[in-house]
Amino acid sequence: MALIKSVRGFTPQFGENCFFAENATIVGDVIMGDDCSIWFNAVLRGDVNSIRIGNKVNIQDGAVLHCLYEKTKIHMGDNISVGHNVTIHGATIKNDVLIGMGATILDNAVVNENTIIAANALVRDGQILEPNSIYAGIPAKKVKDIDPEQTREMINKIANNYLMYASWKLEQIKSFSVIPAKAGTAKPSTKSISYFLRGIPAFAGMTGLFETLN
């Protein structure tokens, strides 16, 4: 099961239909909405400040979310995909955003709606990204404006795909037969089954998705 820990009196909270990979780590003051997924080796550290995540957000393999102690917080809206090995540190990510693999978003940065950040981009401390745009490079610079409808199509596709991937695992788990416990053996608790259901399988990622954004 995922590692879910309380810190300084804060315990992670999450809505309905959220799935956590077995080795995901979620710590402290983390609150997320419905239909979220936290994938393998992803770390959400709400130990030094708060992390708030909306609905239908996927945090992919190896991503790290953290803040500055008593200074910066993470605020994330709805319908966001965070690619493999992304680092988000004390930033604001608004609705309908796609963050490419290996990108870094630093403290006090703001990623506005309907924006795509290319793989390995570096969004600087305090940088404000325009809506309906593609950003790439180190440091991240605006590449071009994009049609909002075209952007939403790509962003929605990735976010919706993650719901589909999770449903595959859920259906697989539901198909397992329940084996009655033998006399003298303990039955599994409802709590342990509940945590098991939050696990999801390895994901074949978004390889090459952002290579064309130049």
Image (tube, helix red, strand yellow):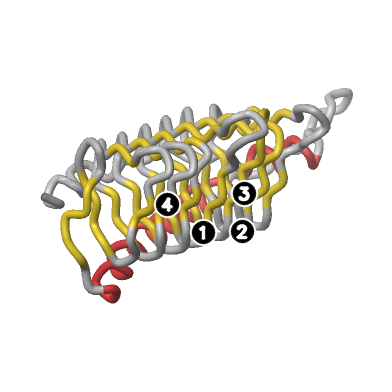
- Mark nearer the viewer, 3 or 1: 3
Q: Which amino acid type corresponds to the residue marked 3 in the rendered image?
A: Arg
Question: Are the two marked residues, 4 and 2, in contact with CB atoms closer than 8 angstroms?
Answer: no
Q: Regarding mark 3 in the picture, which secondary structure is present there?
A: strand
Which residue in the protein does label 4 denote?
A: 165
Which residue in the protein does label 1 denote?
A: 56
The tag earlier along the polypeptide, 4 or 3, is: 3
Left or right of 11, for residue 51: left
Question: Are the two marked residues, 4 and 3, in contact with CB atoms closer than 8 angstroms?
Answer: no
- Mark nearer the viewer, 1 or 4: 1
Q: Position of residue 207 (x, y in %)?
A: 22, 42
Residue 34: mark in rendering:
2
Question: Are the two marked residues, 1 and 2, in contact with CB atoms closer than 8 angstroms?
Answer: yes
Which residue in the protein does label 3 denote?
A: 52
The tag earlier along the polypeptide, 4 or 2, is: 2
Count residues near mark 3 (Cα–Cα under 10 Å), then give few for <14, some for 14-19, many for 20+: some
